[in-house]
Image (cartoon, helix red, strand yellow):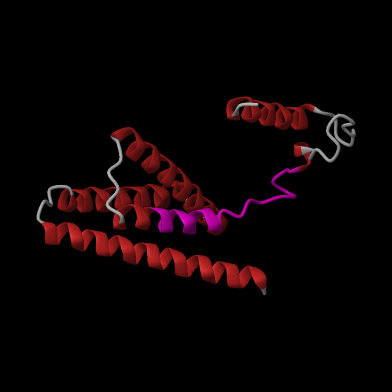
């Protein structure tokens, strides 16, 4: 079975979990999770691990000086922005912050990314590229430390 076919099968099983009547057992897939029961009142996703892992991955990509095609860079930026936007949005919603606060944070991040990009992209000297890679290694190290702290907290 190809990976695409397995993915489609998994998607269909998930849809079957959403469409089935609550409490009805599935004889064909014993133990199939009834996704209808995973309402926000009963289940809140913990995306902290993904947020921390994204710092680690981003730092490793910069430290390794990986040359990615533009579509991969755009995809990574979209996923990174969506994940951290969701995390920040959940945090802001929990303290009752309004849309003006979210807009201010988004514009501030946008300006910081533009300024950083404007400084880093034209760098061609070897020493400058090494400095950027060292900064990436420090971001990766911070990501590893945060993952270790999360793992330590999860274990206790």
- Identity of the residue furthest to the bottom in this view: 156
Residue 123: x and y, percent? 13, 52
Residue 99 appears in the picture as rendered: yes
Front in this rendered view, residue 65 or 59: 65
Residue 97 appears in the picture as rendered: no
Q: Is residue 131 above or below residue 67?
A: below
| Lateral position of residue 129 relative to residue 144, left or right | left
Residue 141: x and y, percent? 39, 67
Residue 19: x and y, percent? 77, 27
Where are the magenta residues, as a range?
A: 38-57
| Lateral position of residue 125 relative to residue 96, left or right | left
Residue displayed at 41% across by 57% down = 55
Residue 83: x and y, percent? 48, 47
Residue displayed at 63% across by 51% down = 45
Quadrant location, the C terminus: bottom right
Quadrant location, the N terminus: top right
- Identity of the residue furthest to the left in this view: 125
Residue displayed at 30% across by 52% down = 108
Front in this rendered view, residue 20 or 154: 154
How many labels, in total?
0
Q: Is residue 32 above or below residue 16?
A: below
Magenta run includes residue 51: yes
Front in this rendered view, residue 9 or 17: 9
Quarter-wise, where is residue 127 in the image?
bottom left
Magenta run includes residue 16: no
| Lateral position of residue 52 relative to residue 62, left or right | right
- Identity of the residue furthest to the front in this view: 1
């Amino acid at each position: 079975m190809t990976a695409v076919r397995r993915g489609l099968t998994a998607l269909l099983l998930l849809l079957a979990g959403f469409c089935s009547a609550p409490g009805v057992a599935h004889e064909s897939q014993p133990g199939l999770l009834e996704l209808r029961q995973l309402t926000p009142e009963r289940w809140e996703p913990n995306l902290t691990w993904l947020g921390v892992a994204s710092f680690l991955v981003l730092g490793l990509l910069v430290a390794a000086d990986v040359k990615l095609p533009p579509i991969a860079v755009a995809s990574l930026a979209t996923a990174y922005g969506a994940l951290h936007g969701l995390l920040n949005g959940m945090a802001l919603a929990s303290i009752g912050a309004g849309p003006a606060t979210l807009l201010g944070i988004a514009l501030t991040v946008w300006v910081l990314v533009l300024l950083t990009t404007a400084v880093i992209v034209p760098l061609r000297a070897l020493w400058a590229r090494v400095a950027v890679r060292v900064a990436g290694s420090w971001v990766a190290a911070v990501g590893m430390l945060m993952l270790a702290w999360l793992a330590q907290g999860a274990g206790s």
